[in-house]
Image (cartoon, helix red, strand yellow):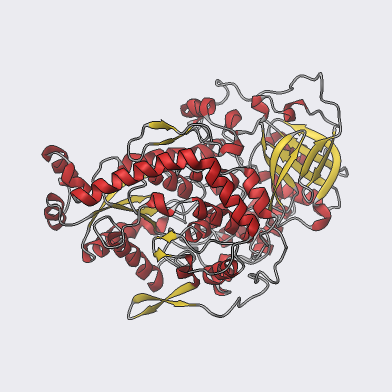
């Protein structure tokens, strides 16, 4: 058990989150406890189904599984999968269900694929209409997870997901069945391809017209070249790192490559562990108790210490809310002041997650933060009590995983550093405040000389307009802050604007002072260009960004945490407007009109579930008023 004193700022943040969340968290845990008692007292969940219900539940099962499902001796394990064979990160899941079923059976349980969830790729939809559905897909995935688990056949779950919105969606949905233990089963990153420095240079050369489309495609294909997660440290790999720090992966499982013996062994071990921590094993570990205030703050600390994706300033808020916990950007801002940056992975450096793994990976990273008192060690995890278990790394012995504590430090100080010698004394994400509202700034990849910029605004209501201005040479030779508005959750689904990074980076490299301010998102792969993103309130809700005009001087000071416009906005009326329903159509967008009308602001997680209004009854799907928090 971690015996190190917790940093006073981390401790204070925990205390105020607990106080703020008291009513909602208490209501949530009461429902988890009631549903858990029913599981323990009355045996496997399917035993409470009427005969016709149960017969439907096992009609298609293999003979041995059918016999087990008829009875109530063995716990049932749900597999919820994001498998598809178009996306590299999820293609390895094709073989997981039969592997998991065999391992669950050997451990004394019975497993079924309870359902699938959609898995879209932001890398494919960047700059396309489909990207406007990306953030909404997180809540669709949460609902799909709830549908899968709503059959009341299960005593634990194995969650198969990796990327962007998939992991947060799976966790949000599973938390509404918080009495069920849940283990995430990762697929791992692809092996390293084209070096990130060459990839980034190729993108800028293509933006400048120096290489052809075929040359650019060849570079990208050498980067994204096989099954597995993309290797840069964007949202997908931030997901994976945070889930392990929250104790929802087996220790060291996160960054093991697909289709290796160790990956296979860890997959089987996760299946066995799901049986052991079910209500009918000796170590009942309900998900709703694992994801508590300490686990949420641990995730925030890990995000900051690793220079992770800004998308998690949305996702962590939404995931916490699903567990009855109210997390705010103020909490992240205060933590960022005391959490040092320990890693350099692209876009914050040239290394990728395979280099991080080789340097010591999660065992070294977690150990350093535990020893510094920045992580809470006294937490419940799927591996047992205490985050100290995650100081250990797995290896193979007789084709089974064994865990040994790593006592050595980092094997590569250019990638992973100790707390005593960080890359930066504070976290990689800053919260900005000012007369334009509140925004997020990822500073871990920004050069110190670019942290402060004061320049005239160039206003765009569509990212394509900015791209056209760049291609026409209209942005050459001038300092400016690109204001890209009507990109918020209610306007058009808050798309990532990663397509803007290469042209803006070109101008930055030419010596121009360039930054971006937007109520949209930037990708987890963005960072070189100084940016104030997730600006709230958004333009579609009357935010001051709608009042900005070309030429207004904007000062973005990421170091001081301020965002101001040096112009008098009083008396102005908003310019521009979000797309009408008639124009927001095509690529399925018209199916999501209800999301546009109900989604909450970025600062509250950009969720359609009413993060500030209540929590959900465990396993019921009914909204329960959590009162004022």
Residue occupying image coordinates x 75% and y 42%: 516
Q: Is residue 605 visible?
A: yes
Q: Is 9 in front, or is 166?
A: 9
Residue 475 placement, left or right of 111? right
* Residue 383, quarter of picture: bottom left
Where is residue 406? Give x, y as percent: 51, 77
Q: Quadrant of residue 237?
A: bottom right
Residue 168 lies, with reference to residue 380, above or below; the image says: above
Q: Quadrant of the C terminus?
A: top right
- Image position, residue 184 (x, y; %): 40, 56
Depicted 211 relative to depicted 566: above or below: below
Q: Residue at x 50, y 63 (%)?
A: 189
Q: Residue at x 59, y 57 (%)?
A: 301
| Vertical placement of residue 601 versus 330, above or below | above
Q: Which is nearer the eye, 603 or 289?
A: 289
Side (left or right) of 51 relative to 38: left
Say if residue 308 shows up in the picture: no
Nearer to the camera, 465 or 548: 548
Give coordinates of residue 363: x percent, y percent.
52, 71
Q: Is residue 399 left or right of residue 462?
A: left
* Vertical position of residue 124 compared to residue 195: above or below: above
Residue 174, position as x, y percentages in the image: 38, 46
Closest to the observer, 497 or 392 = 392
């Amino acid at each position: 058990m971690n015996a190190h004193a917790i940093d006073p700022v981390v401790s204070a943040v925990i205390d105020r989150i607990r106080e703020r969340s008291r009513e909602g968290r208490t209501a949530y845990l009461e429902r988890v406890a009631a549903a858990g008692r029913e599981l323990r007292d009355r045996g496997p969940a399917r035993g409470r189904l009427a005969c016709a219900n149960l017969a439907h539940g096992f009609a298609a099962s293999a003979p041995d599984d059918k016999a087990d499902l008829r009875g109530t001796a063995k716990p049932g394990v749900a597999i919820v999968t994001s498998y598809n064979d178009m996306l590299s990160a999820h293609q390895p899941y094709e073989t997981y269900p039969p592997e998991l079923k065999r391992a669950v059976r050997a451990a004394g349980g019975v497993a079924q694929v309870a359902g699938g969830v959609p898995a879209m790729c932001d890398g494919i939809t960047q700059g396309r209409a489909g990207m406007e559905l990306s953030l909404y897909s997180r809540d669709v995935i949460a609902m799909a997870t709830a549908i899968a688990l709503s059959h009341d056949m299960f005593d634990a779950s194995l969650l198969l997901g990796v990327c962007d919105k998939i992991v947060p969606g799976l966790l949000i949905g599973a938390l509404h069945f918080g009495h069920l233990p849940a283990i995430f089963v990762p697929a791992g990153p692809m092996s390293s391809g084209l070096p990130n420095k060459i990839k980034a240079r190729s993108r800028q050369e293509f933006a400048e017209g120096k290489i052809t489309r075929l040359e650019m495609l060849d570079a990208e294909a050498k980067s994204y070249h096989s099954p597995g997660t993309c290797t840069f440290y964007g949202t997908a790999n931030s997901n994976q790192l945070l889930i392990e720090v929250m104790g929802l992966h087996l220790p060291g499982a996160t960054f093991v490559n697909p289709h290796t013996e160790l990956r296979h062994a860890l997959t089987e071990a996760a299946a066995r562990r799901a049986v052991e921590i079910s209500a009918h094993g000796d170590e009942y570990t309900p998900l709703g108790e694992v994801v508590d205030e300490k686990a949420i703050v641990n995730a925030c600390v890990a995000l900051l210490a690793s220079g992770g994706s800004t998308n998690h300033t949305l996702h962590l808020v939404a995931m916490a809310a699903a567990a009855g916990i109210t997390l705010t950007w103020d909490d992240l801002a205060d933590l960022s002041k005391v959490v040092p940056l320990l890693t350099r992975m692209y876009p914050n450096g040239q290394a990728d997650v395979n280099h991080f793994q080789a340097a010591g990976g999660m065992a070294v990273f977690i150990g350093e933060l535990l020893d510094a008192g920045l992580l809470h060690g006294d937490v419940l995890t799927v591996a047992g009590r205490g985050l100290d278990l995650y100081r250990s790394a797995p290896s193979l012995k007789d084709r089974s995983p064994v865990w040994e504590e790593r006592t050595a430090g980092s094997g590569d100080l250019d990638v992973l550093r100790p707390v005593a010698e960080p890359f930066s004394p504070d976290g990689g994400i800053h919260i900005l405040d000012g007369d334009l509202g509140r925004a997020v700034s990822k500073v871990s990849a920004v050069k110190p000389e670019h942290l402060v910029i004061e320049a005239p605004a160039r206003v765009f209501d569509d990212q394509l307009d900015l791209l056209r201005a760049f291609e026409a040479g209209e942005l050459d030779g001038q300092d400016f802050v690109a204001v890209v508005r009507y990109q918020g959750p209610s306007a058009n689904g808050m798309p990532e604007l990663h397509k803007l990074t290469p042209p803006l980076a070109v101008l930055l490299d030419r010596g121009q002072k360039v930054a971006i301010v937007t109520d949209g998102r930037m990708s987890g792969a963005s960072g070189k260009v100084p940016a104030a993103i997730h600006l709230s309130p958004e333009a579609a809700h009357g935010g001051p960004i709608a009042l900005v005009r070309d030429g207004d001087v904007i000062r973005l000071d990421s170091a001081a945490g301020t965002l101001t416009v040096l112009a008098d906005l009083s008396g102005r009326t908003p310019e521009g407007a979000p797309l009408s329903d008639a124009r927001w159509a095509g690529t399925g967008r018209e199916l999501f009109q209800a999301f546009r009308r109900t989604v909450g602001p970025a600062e509250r997680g950009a969720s359609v579930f009413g993060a500030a209004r209540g929590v959900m009854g465990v396993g019921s799907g009914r909204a329960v008023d959590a009162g004022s928090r």
